[in-house]
Amino acid sequence: MPPQSRRVVVPFTPQKPPWRLEAGDAVALMRELEDRSVHLVITDPPYFIDGMGADWDDSTLARRAARAGVVGSLPVGMKFDPGQARAFGRFMSAVAGEAIRVLKPGGFFIAFSQARLYHRLAVAAEDAGFEVRDMIGWTYTGQAKAFSMDHFVRKMPLPEAKKAALIKSMEGRKTPQLRPQIEPMVLAQKPREGTFVQNWAEHGTGLMDATQTWEGKFPGNVIHCPKPTPAEKGAGNAHMTVKPVRLIEHLVRLFSAPGQVVLDPFAGSGTHGIAALRAGRAFIGFDIEESYVTLAKRRIEEVAHER
């Protein structure tokens, strides 16, 4: 049989700190990374609700948003069922399995999720061999998503008097959707080799930098930070779940050290790469959408040229 040609891996940029971005399946690209080659994995994986799964189709989501509008940055009418939660759990098991392999001992795995999916994420990390250290909550001011049932009742084949009575009985009642004000992250750690001191001496991982305060206070597991403004997102950035650079940079500085390697297998529009470079870390990013990789490169290059 003829020898198989090895795929050409996108190299790091010559800038300091170096970075690289590549389009493709996250798990497949993670498998090409060497064992123990990354110090921190921090990522915002797909939400796994109605079109936002492993096969994320940005064009479909954009059409839905344009047609129906958005609530809380997500297209109106998105559906959720337990099957999606189970699929998310299976998907994150594969991601966590690769994350624990590529991380150095004591390295941290931080991943965002929806409140209704967080349990699947935490179990996936734990089953992969991580120690779940904490849950971090990003808090913000959210838009109410709950809906009243009046318009449904008005379309029902009932006498008007019964419709009026039913509507009155549900006065003040809405769908069970609390106003979103928190997004959870799992904070998991690859098992250390030896004591905290021994692991740090050998790998430079396993300890947090407690000098990285937030609003002048000791680092906590609840972080309030406004959602990114259009100016922060940048022109042409239509990604639906962009995170604030300030929040991600805080986490990068807290759980890694200057010069270390940060990996985001779901790079999206490149926020985590921007944060890593601003913190003086090298960055590796993957995304299944070629258009997002192009956007992320543009945003990260702007920051790289500032340094």
Image (spheres, helix red, strand yellow):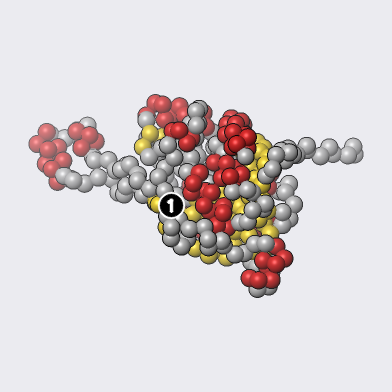
208 relative to 226 in the view: left or right: right
Q: Is residue 18 above or below residue 137?
A: above
Write the residue at 66% across / 38% down.
Answer: 21
Residue hosting label 1:
138
Residue 160 visible somewhere in the drawing: yes
237 relative to 66 in the view: left or right: right
Write the residue at 12% across / 34% down.
Answer: 159
Residue 31 % position (x, y): 71, 48
Q: Residue furthest bottom?
A: 195
Write the residue at 43% across / 60% down.
Answer: 217
Q: Secondary structure at mark 1?
A: strand
Question: Which quadrant would residue 127 be assigned to in this image?
Answer: bottom right
Q: Is residue 224 above or below residue 271?
A: below
Residue 70 % position (x, y): 38, 34
Query: In front: 52, or 195?
Result: 195
Q: Across the whole image, how many numbered discs are drawn on residues?
A: 1
Residue 120 visible somewhere in the drawing: no
Query: In front: 220, or 150?
Result: 220
Query: In front: 253, or 135?
Result: 253
Q: Residues within 10 Å of mark 1 (few under 14, many from 20)?
A: many
Which quadrant would the N terminus be assigned to in this image?
top right
Write the residue at 46% across / 62% down.
Answer: 218
Q: Is residue 77 above or below residue 280?
A: above
Which quadrant would the C terminus be assigned to in this image?
top right
**Amino acid type assigned to the residue bearing label 1 in the image:** Trp
Q: Residue furthest right?
A: 1
Residue 121 % position (x, y): 52, 55
Residue 106 % position (x, y): 64, 64
14 relative to 45 in the view: left or right: right
